[in-house]
Image (spheres, grey):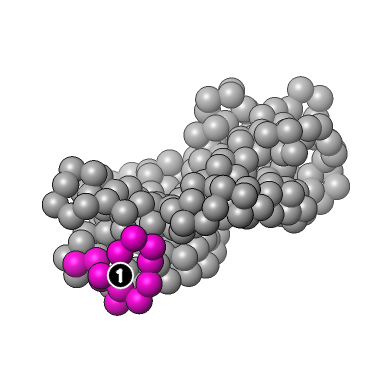
Amino acid sequence: LGTRLYRVDVPGEVVFDEFHFGKFLNWYLRGEYFFDIHPPLGKLVFWACAKIVGYQPGEFNYDRIGTAFPDGYKYAAIRRATALLGSLCVPVMYLTARNFRMSIEASIVATALILFDISYCIESRLILVDAQLILSCALALLAMTQLWKTPRATPQRYLWIVLSGLACGAALSVKWTGLATPGLTGLVCLLGIYFPHNRRPIPFLQCVAIGAIGLAFYASLWWLHFFLLDKTGDGDAFMSIDFQKTLIGGNFYDPKFPKQNLF
């Protein structure tokens, strides 16, 4: 926590892609529709944190990199949320290393590589979703290694199937590049190429269940995304005219027009 939280309020100005994700956060809080190339989980986490800490967007719009935050603006609270999530990856790495039957000493070294990685440390101190992406990928790998350890046909086995599905869905729901980790572990699990404690493939239906849970979690986040953004905004032009008819305050808004089905 110290490597991520120390002076997290410095600099007191917009840094790098805070220019984008700060805007997305404010648009969520105002309900203004926007378009982004990434899935919504990372931004929804910021929205939830903002609700908890009482963050208010006000008139500040993250207009450009280097813009100073107004006095009393709770940007540091959102940065602290990122720092906390980035810090969680450290114990997750240790547990994963132990699941791979690494010694305690080797597991500590692997953990230290995450703890003191400068690029990851910096990304964990700003309003960016990369810390969430790496954490969700790490959780997916941890969950799958735990799944391989549990005996078949036990309550613990079914619990880790659900948790593996949720973790894989979370990795995909932050950025689509997050598919790499659950995709690789899924291929290994299906083929049973190698994993500690067990060389047998995970049954096909269990792999299907993990995938289905992950996709259901992914789809549910899009429902929340569209539910929160019911007003006209910066991303209207990316959507169809029928969709724009549902956005309050837009040029095509029609209060009688039925909202489109998510699927």
Identity of the residue drawn at 58% across and 51% down: 107
Relative to 129, is 186 on the left or the right?
left
Q: Quadrant of the C terminus?
A: bottom left
The magenta region covers: 191-203
Q: Nearer the viewer, residue 177 or 108?
A: 108
| Magenta stretch: helix, strand or loop mostly | loop
Vertical side of 87 occupied by 247: above or below: below
Q: Secondary structure at mark 1?
A: loop
Decide whether residue 259 is among the magenta residues.
no
Image-quadrant location for residue 113: bottom right
Q: Nearer the viewer, residue 153 or 75?
A: 153
* Residue 5 position in % (x across, y down): 73, 33
* Residue 59 position in % (x across, y down): 70, 34
* Residue 204 position in % (x across, y down): 19, 70
Q: Quadrant of the N terminus?
A: top right
Relative to 50, is 154 on the left or the right?
left
Relative to 33, is 185 on the left or the right?
left
Identity of the residue drawn at 52% across and 56% down: 102
Q: Nearer the viewer, residue 99 or 216?
A: 99
Query: Could one spot residue 238 in this view of the protein?
Result: no
Q: Residues within 10 Å of mark 1 (few under 14, many from 20)?
A: some
* Residue 220 position in % (x across, y down): 32, 49
Query: Could one spot residue 199 in this view of the protein?
Result: yes
Q: Which residue is mark 1?
A: 199
